Amino acid sequence: MDAAMIETSTAYKRHRFPAPLIAHAVWLYFRFPLSLRLVEELLLERGIVVSYETIRRWAAKFGPAIARGVRRRAPRPGDIWHLDEVRVVIRGEVHWLWRAVDQHGVVLDEILQRHRDKRAAKRLLVSLLKRQGWAPRRIVTDKLASYGAAKREVAPGIEHRSHKGLNNRAENSHVPLRKRERQMQGFRSAGALQRFTSVFSAVRNLFVPPASKRLAISTHLHRLAAFARWRSAAGLGVAA
């Protein structure tokens, strides 16, 4: 059992409900387009009486820790990174969610920022390179000039392709969060969005199979492996 698993297991102490139930509720909330009240209803159908506010606290406490464990156990991403930004309105104020994905659609990093300029693009690149610990073979962006300006300062040696049609991978990566945003009727604050999307994307990376594994048997095996990694990250057992 590694240190992260020990830390997560310890966090369940002094909770009235058992660890597997708490982790299951957190998984339901982040894996599917369910409100907290719907997760409450699903648990009630199984005879488990727990309030949606308790589920909210579980998601806030255990979600980030489990997501960190999931990311630590993730395989090395692809060597082509697609960068893009999407407009998000929070309480009437415009923000930009900057996102990087690899060529397989795996989300690598996300940063919510108020601006859509070189400084914001540079912050994404610096965070991305620091988190991954290595540089990609190529980055792909749309025509926003801020990307080229930021790349020249941060990583001048990396190949950069700037073309609207080449960046569908990154643009498509916004769709799942957009759907969840509508279901949740928007986000209450910038911090809430940043915290939610960090866990949400880690869970999607884990459970959604890449296009190369969409055959029935491949999808089944992928999900079994994902469940094992989830249980390990949640402190419930050791992944195979």
Image (cartoon, rainbow, N blue to C red):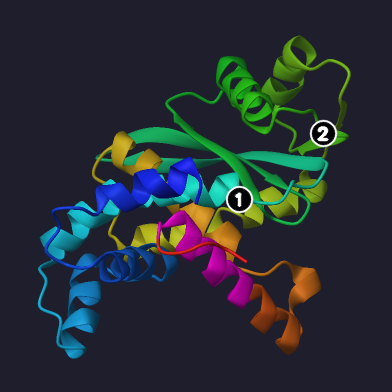
**73 and 55: which is toward the camera:** 73
| Snapshot quadrant of residue 130 | top right
Q: Is residue 49 left or right of residue 2?
A: left
- Which residue is found at the position 89% from the left and 18% from the top? 157
Asked if the magenta segment contains residue 9, the reply would be no
Q: Is the magenta stretch mostly helix, strand or loop?
A: helix
Q: Which residue was labeled with disc 1?
A: 73
- Which residue is found at the position 48% from the left and 23% from the top? 115
The Cα atoms of the two marked residues, 1 and 2, are separated by 20 Å
Q: Where is residue 219 in the image (x, y as percent from the top left)?
A: 68, 80
Q: Residue 225 carries which label?
A: none
Q: Position of residue 159 (x, y in %)?
A: 89, 28
- Which residue is found at the position 42% from the left and 42% from the top? 88
SS under mark 2: loop
Q: Which amino acid type is marked by label 2?
A: Pro
**12 and 84: which is toward the camera:** 12
Magenta extent: 223-235
Disc 2 packing (10 Å; few <14; some 14–19; many ≥20)? some
Q: Which residue was labeled with disc 2?
A: 136
**3 and 136: which is toward the camera:** 3
